[in-house]
Image: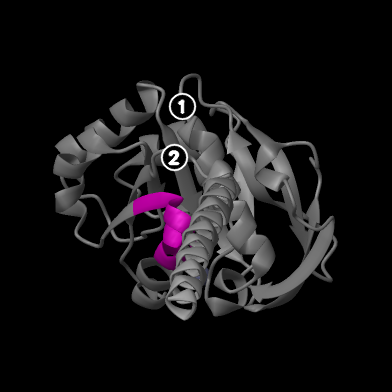
Amino acid sequence: MKFGKNRFTKLELSTDGIVRLVALILLIGAGVIGHAFADQPKKPIKVLMVGGGASHDFDTWYKGRDVEILQEKNFAEVTYTDNTDAVLALLGDIDVLYLTNNQPFKDPKTREAILKFAESGKGLVLGHAALWYNWADWPDYNLKLVSGGSRGHDKYGPFEVTVTDKKHPVMKGIPAKFTLKDELYYYKVDPNGAGIQVLATAKSDKPESYPSVFVVNHPQAKIVGIALGHDGESHNLEAYEKMLTNAIRWVAK
Ligand SMILES: [Zn+2]
């Protein structure tokens, strides 16, 4: 009888202990999860990324790497397309348009819709090839959205990027200077455009430096240009990852 009672008491304590332990684990777990999500936006930013065209491996570095960077921790929900005719139908439901393509937008309605998207105050990020003068038959793209563009670049190789506006949110966490291998774009401002605010410059061993990361002073839209991005030497760089994420976050607001 005594033996039995002892057994019962021991079992009861043990069960209580397990209950307490499970409750503690759940409490700690909830705290950890709560803390992890505290830094994240409530809803992922809806991004439409457009790629495709000449001279670049869009599938590896944009559809692959940049989508991976942006979708990490549910930061963004990215739709990637290299079908420029599909863009018109996709524009209505997004926060940010991220253009990286140098293939043309052939449909006049799509061109108009992209300009209207900007005029409605939405956000755009323009990466590397999208900062070129790609389309002679659509001058409004460079004039209104890029406020200029590039018609040349240094031969692919190492150069230095210097942050010139450390306080801008797009530059948060970016080292003051870093070097990488890329194509140094000769971006030039069109004096007839809205102008730009330079956030970082790029310089090789040649005397002139060029805007490398900048904000286009569009009257309604938030637009960030990132001239870097030819291949994995930039896309795999921590500074690039941060700048891209910062830029998408900033233009989405
Ligand atoms: Zn390139």
**Viewer-side residue, 41 vs 115:** 41
- Residue wearing tag 1: 221
**Viewer-side residue, 188 vs 234:** 234
Location of the N terminus by quadrant is: bottom left
**Viewer-side residue, 8 vs 190:** 8
Residue located 51% across and 31% down the image = 222
Which tag, 2 or 1, sits closer to the chain's start? 2
Mark sitting on residue 124: 2
Placement of 19 over or under 96, stated as above or below = below
Residue located 79% across and 40% down the image = 165
Residue 224 quadrant: top right
Mark 1, Cα crowd under 10 Å, few <14 / some 14-19 / many 20+, is: many
Under 8 Å from ligand 1: the CB of mark 2?
Answer: no
Within the magenta stretch, is there residue 67?
yes
Which colour style is shown? one colour
Callout 1 secondary element: loop
Placement of 100 over or under 91, stated as above or below = below
**Rendered location of residue 111, percent (x, y):** 25, 38
Within the magenta stretch, is there residue 253?
no
Q: In this view, does 27 lie to the left or right of 242?
A: left
Residue located 24% across and 32% down the image = 112
Identify the magenta region. Answer: 66-77
Callout 2 secondary element: strand
